[in-house]
Amino acid sequence: QVQLVESGGGLVQAGGSLRLSCAVSGRTFMRSAMGWFRQAPGKERDVVAVTVSSAGATYYTDSVKGRFTISRDNAKNTVYLQINSLKPEDTALYYCAARRGAGLATQSGEYDYWGQGTQVTVSS
């Protein structure tokens, strides 16, 4: 059974940093995409960053480029999202996701496995 468990969220002031972690169990996703999505109240779940380990490929949505960094520790089967220069508009529930298929997928419907989410709240 595949499980994704996020951690690392919290309440921070604008300009602060957080490091989100996603521990994966049940299988590895070396050749598949793993991503971070976020969903603010009343809004859709949107992609934040995606990585495909075997291809060395990453994707970032425009609003986080230069501030967020996605990385993987394959030995620990864990994906991270380093979030710097936080803004109030980054406030959301952040989800980790994994897909069975290949390719740098950026749509939530393309992902097969999801974590329960970790809340990030940024105060101004």
Image (spheres, helix red, strand yellow):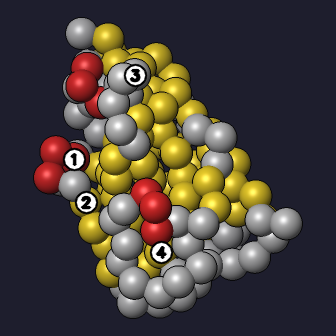
What residue is pinned by disc 1? Answer: 64
| Residue 11 left/right relative to 84 | right
What residue is pinned by disc 3? Answer: 41
What residue is pinned by disc 2? Answer: 60
Determine whether 108 is above or below 56 in the image. Answer: above
Look at label 3 and name its amino acid. Answer: Pro
| Residue 62 left/right relative to 101 | left
Q: Quadrant of residue 57?
A: bottom left
Extreme residue toward the top, this view: 124
The answer for how far apart the CA atoms under marks 4 and 1 are is 18 Å
Disc 2 vs disc 3: which is toward the camera?
A: 3
Disc 3 vs disc 1: which is toward the camera?
A: 3
Look at label 2 and name its amino acid. Answer: Tyr
For the point 52% across and 65% down, the residue is 111
Where residue 67 appears, x then y in whole percent? Answer: 23, 46
What residue is pinned by disc 4? Answer: 33
Ranked by sequence position, the earlier of labels 4 and 1 is: 4
For the point 46% across and 68% down, the residue is 110
Ranked by sequence position, the earlier of labels 2 and 3 is: 3
Q: How crowded is the residue under tag 2: few (<14 C-alpha within 10 Å), some, or many (20+)? A: many
| Residue 61 left/right relative to 91 | left
For the point 46% across and 17% down, the residue is 11
Q: Secondary structure at mark 1?
A: helix
